[in-house]
Amino acid sequence: MRRLSLTELSVASSVATGSVVLGTLLLTRGNRPVFAVLVGAVCVVLFAGYFRWQFRLETLNLRERIYKLPIEAETSKAPISPEFVDLGESVQAASRALQLRLKAAGEERKQLEAVLDSMQDAVVAVDTAGRIQWTNQPMRRLIPGHPVGSSVRIGHALVQTIRDPDVLECVRQALEDKTVSVRGAESLVPGHKFDVNASPMPGGGAVAVLHDITRIEEVERTQRDFVANVSHELRTPLTSISGYVETLLDMSGQSGEPGLSPMAREFLGTILKNATRMTRLTEDLLVMARVEGPSANLNPVPLRTDFLVRDAVKALRGLVQENQAILEVGEMTETQVFADQDAVMQVLGNLIENAIKYGQPRNGTRSRVIITASEISDPYDLVEFRVRDFGSGIPSEHLNRIFERFYRVDKTRSRESGGTGLGLAIARHMVQSQGGTIRAESELGVGSTFVFTLPKAIYPLQNVL
């Protein structure tokens, strides 16, 4: 039996309604009124029930087809009634488009997984609740009890998988503060050290990258030990050479001893000059190895800024007189900084000495150096020190590299003045290790200014002398 379409059902419903009307008319004229009404009512009920059953059947069929999307979009049958054909075709088109998008997304995910698995760094992503969403193979190697090819407790809390407190704290800060967090972790894998970098993701959650720096630390430690050992071994012979040369120069022509010829005196002077320079280089290398090593001992305490500058100026009084320089103390603050006194004195000494040696104007006038210190509040409460000279200035291409070890702007002038190329590197390390920053500002023909900052003392001492 052929099934009726929705249009045909509507026509049948209209006929039933007409029968009811006709029965009503017959009732008013006295022609079989009861029979006509009953026939019309039965027809209406039958056609209404059949129409409802047919419509529900079509709706269930279409719903079943939609539930199968996009798996059986091409093989599922078309809707029964012609009225649903257009809707079915639209659903099929949407299904095909969805299949293409899902396929592209799957390929992109596989590519991303391949890239992450090929990384040397371990990567783990968590959702807003701290549950693991995915990891790469290097991360799975770090987790005990999980083979490389197995899943790593996806959906479980990160704290149930990783016990290192530094890693967990780094991820927590990224999730709660929505900022990039960087820490070091040493207890994740025995004998290994990691740099942990956790960043918040735009859609919520965070991703953490763990970089194994164990090998780098070993190489750097070996280099530091080598430099320290060599420098220490060179100190004794260099001291002996300088002492013997100075003795020869002082004893020449005394107590009836024959005097040295001008050429011999010149040779001895050259030996003494280079021995002194080598001694300074070994001393700077030892300082560099000490401040970069893990055993570097800094004892930060509240210190008055003006007292630090005053002591540094006093310590360099001999150098100022020797070079006939002008050393001025400008704007100064009495604010206390939280720093190590010896380290700050060495930083100020290196910067002032460089300004005196290399800050001489081209016209040959005396070097002039101005030291100032003031409070700043950006990015937080600090004291900013400035050491300014009025020399020829530093070209802009050298400003980013002058704090590197052994880097010299003018190599010939640096050697003539006895520079080792380590003073600024030592200053940078000492400032950064105390929570400060250091930079250089310069303009050719005008001069240079070296600026470094130190944190203010949160609990300053009273009655500091």
Image (cartoon, rainbow, N blue to C red):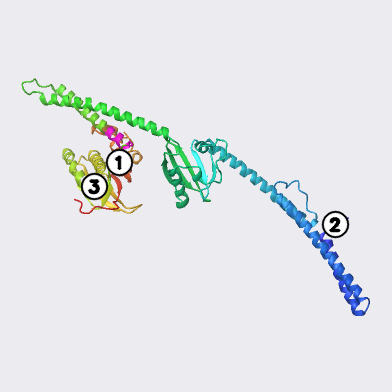
Hey, which residue is sitting farthest bottom in the picture? 29
Q: Nearer the viewer, residue 366 or 34?
A: 34
Alpha-carbon span between mark 3 and mark 1: 19 Å
Q: Is residue 276 above or below residue 33?
A: above
* Residue highlighted by disc 2: 3
The amino acid on which the numbered mark 1 sits, given as a three-letter code, is Met
Q: Is residue 228 above or below residue 97?
A: above
Q: Which residues are magenta?
A: 284-294
10 Å neighbourhood of mark 3: few (<14), some, or many (≥20)? many
Toward which corner of the image does residue 227 lie, by quadrant? top left
Toward which corner of the image does residue 282 lie, by quadrant? top left
Sequence-wise first label, 3 or 2? 2
* Residue highlighted by disc 3: 371
Helix, strand or loop under label 2: loop
* Residue highlighted by disc 1: 430
Helix, strand or loop under label 1: helix
Residue 418, image x, y percentages: 24, 33
99 inside magenta stretch: no
Mostly what secondary structure, the magenta segment? Answer: helix
Q: Is residue 146 above or below residue 338?
A: above
The answer to whether mark 3 and mark 2 are in CB contact below 8 A is no
